[in-house]
Every structure is written in C-alpha cells, then in structure tokens.
Amino acid sequence: MFQTEAAEQVAKLNVVSVKKDSVTLSWTKVEDAHGYRIFRYLTTEKKWKAIKTTTALSYSDTEVDSAS
C-alpha cells in the first residue's frame, strides 16, 4: 500500500481496556480516511513498529509485554 498524502493522527484516542496481556484502543473516524495504521513502541529497540492496518475504529493488542 502506498500513501500519497500526509497521514493525520486520530482524534479522541481512548483506552477502552487494559489487562495484564492486552490493551484495547478506540478512536473517532478521521474524515476521508481509508484505514488506520497501528504502531507499537519497542522499548528494547527504542523505535515504533507498524503492527496492523485496519479500517475498524478500534483495535485489541493481545501481544502486550507486561514488562515493558
């Protein structure tokens, strides 16, 4: 997938649920958005990594490292 325009950040990002091994996020729709890229911060590498592209308005990350 190629992006031809600058990406906008979502507005009203909400933490819906936090558990020992998962986190669920939700957000409001960005006008004219065709999808959303989810990133995870890798503490050991000190960088962001894209983990998912979705058209949904929420995401549950079930690969959370509780030690991070």
Image (cartoon, helix red, strand yellow):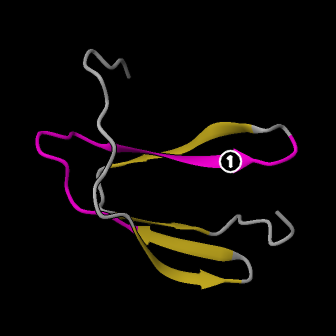
Magenta-drawn segment: 26-44
Seen at 19% across and 56% down, the residue is 29
Seen at 32% across and 20% down, the residue is 3
Residue 13 in magenta stretch: no
Q: Secondary structure at mark 1?
A: strand
Q: Position of residue 13 (x, y in %)?
A: 37, 64
| Image quarter in which the C terminus is found | bottom right
Seen at 30% across and 59% down, the residue is 56
Crowdedness of circle 1 by 10 Å Cα count: few (<14), some, many (20+)? few
Seen at 64% across and 38% down, the residue is 49
The residue to which callout 1 is attached is: 41
For residue 65, which quarter of the picture? bottom right
From the viewer's perspective, is residue 23 above or below residue 45? below
Q: Position of residue 54 (x, y in %)?
A: 37, 49
For residue 32, which quarter of the picture? top left
Q: Position of residue 25 (x, y in %)?
A: 45, 69
